[in-house]
Image (tube, helix red, strand yellow):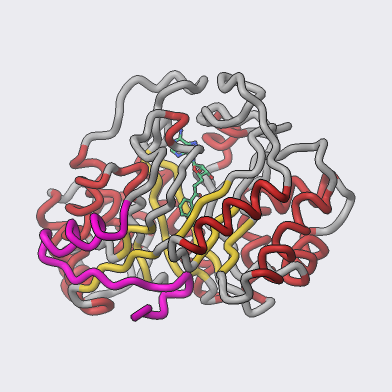
Amino acid sequence: MTLIEKLESGKRLTYEDGVSLYNLDLITLGKYASKIREEKHGRKTYYNVNRHINPTNICKDVCHFCAYSASRKNPQPYTLKHEEIMATVEQSVKNGIKEVHIVSAHNPDTGLEWYLEIFAKIKEKYPQLHVKALTAAEIHFLSEQYNKSHEDIINLMIQNGVDSMPGGGAEVFDEEVRKRICGGKVTSQQWLDIHKLWHEKGRQSNATMLFGHIESRAVRVDHMIRLRELQDLTGGFNAFIPLVYQKENNYLKVTDFPTANEILKTFAISRIMLDNIPHLKAYWVTSTIKLALIAQEFGANDLDGTIEKESINSAAGANSANGMKQKEFLELIESSRFIPVQRDSLYNEVD
Ligand code: V47
């Protein structure tokens, strides 16, 4: 069977097929990715009204792509007090958020309680608010720092009111590239095992892939295949989020930004390869909003959220520090001839 015959029949593609997809032209890839998107979601594009909070930028790990960590090019270390975080959440709840997304650097000085008790405080005051928090990288850091198993940390997250896990910290799974961009933090297998454990508790999470730096196309496809294999076992991933690498203020020394063609091909190939992950998110922060809107024609059915404040990617050059207004989201999605649908964190539609 040729690659096109496999695409026509909807047959699951192998790793080799996935790498060969990059040799097809963008419009052909868009046709097949759009077909899958239409079957799964029609013309609907999801977004949510959320707030990102990054409580500390002090990090014991060294990731070469990161411009956010205070121990490197960002000279302003901070650690928020719980009262400060609660004041932010209170204001954002007044603004109508449905989700708070809390991710930190790996700060060895705060104590485990500082990381966990804030979730319980938020849940107690706002039981209806969805708490998406702690990447697998943070879970691994906390388990090592406080001599606990991954499962111990996961149980503590659940006890303290975390509802779902974000997809950060995955970067790329290929061990050689990983060693060069973020050696020393959670390994690929540990990242996958932590999400597996979380799914086995009946919980859901997302998965990211950081691309457009020193990795090859084959490395991206390998990343997708490892996620697809885990998803076959657990079914716990809601969304796949290809994050476009931002090149400012870090130590990776990549001068080229991936072309729009390469970014859109990667979205389309993700949609085709990850047949078992329901949603493909074009995170407007790293793709730019213009390309995220075009990505709707290449398989993406979710643009993430309003965010309000963004620190990690804007530190590396993304134009996202102040988030996006809901009205703007609606108008942009509508004007690109898709149907905007507000969702909650687990993809239930919100009136
Ligand atoms: O894990 C860091 C990435 C991630 C850079 O789960 C960079 O719904 C690009 O994971 N260029 C954090 N990316 C963001 C994240 C996320 C965002 C939105 C939604 C969800 C979700 C997850 O940002 C990090 C890292 O992979 N990152 N530095 C950079 N220079």
Residue 337, image quadrant:
bottom left
At 78% from the left and 60% from the top, the residue drawn is 153
Quadrant containing the C terminus is bottom left
Image coordinates for residue 24, horizontal then vertical, percent: 16, 50
Residue that sits furthest to the right in the current view:
147
| Magenta region, residue range | 325-351
- Of residues 68 and 63, which is closer to you in this image? 68
The N terminus: image quadrant: bottom left
Q: Residue at x 43, y 34 (%)?
A: 314
- Where residue 158 appears, x then y in whole percent? 73, 70
Q: Is residue 65 above or below residue 53?
A: above
Number of callouts: 0
Task: Report whether residue 215 is seen.
Answer: yes
Nearest the viewer among 92 and 193 is: 92
Residue in front for this viewpoint, 197 or 89 = 89
The answer to whether one can see residue 6 in this image is: no
Q: Of 313 and 56, which appears nearest the observer?
A: 56
Q: In the rendering, at what x and y percent does residue 151 appear?
A: 78, 65
> What residue is rendered at 60% in x and 49% in y?
103
Magenta residue check for 211 = no
**Is residue 343 one of those drawn in magenta?**
yes
Residue 90, placed above or below residue 349: above
Looking at the image, residue 288 lies above or below residue 66: below
Residue 228 shown left or right of residue 127 in the figure? left
Which residue is located at x 77 percent, y 71 percent? 159
Q: Where does residue 266 sit, x and y in percent of width and height? A: 29, 49
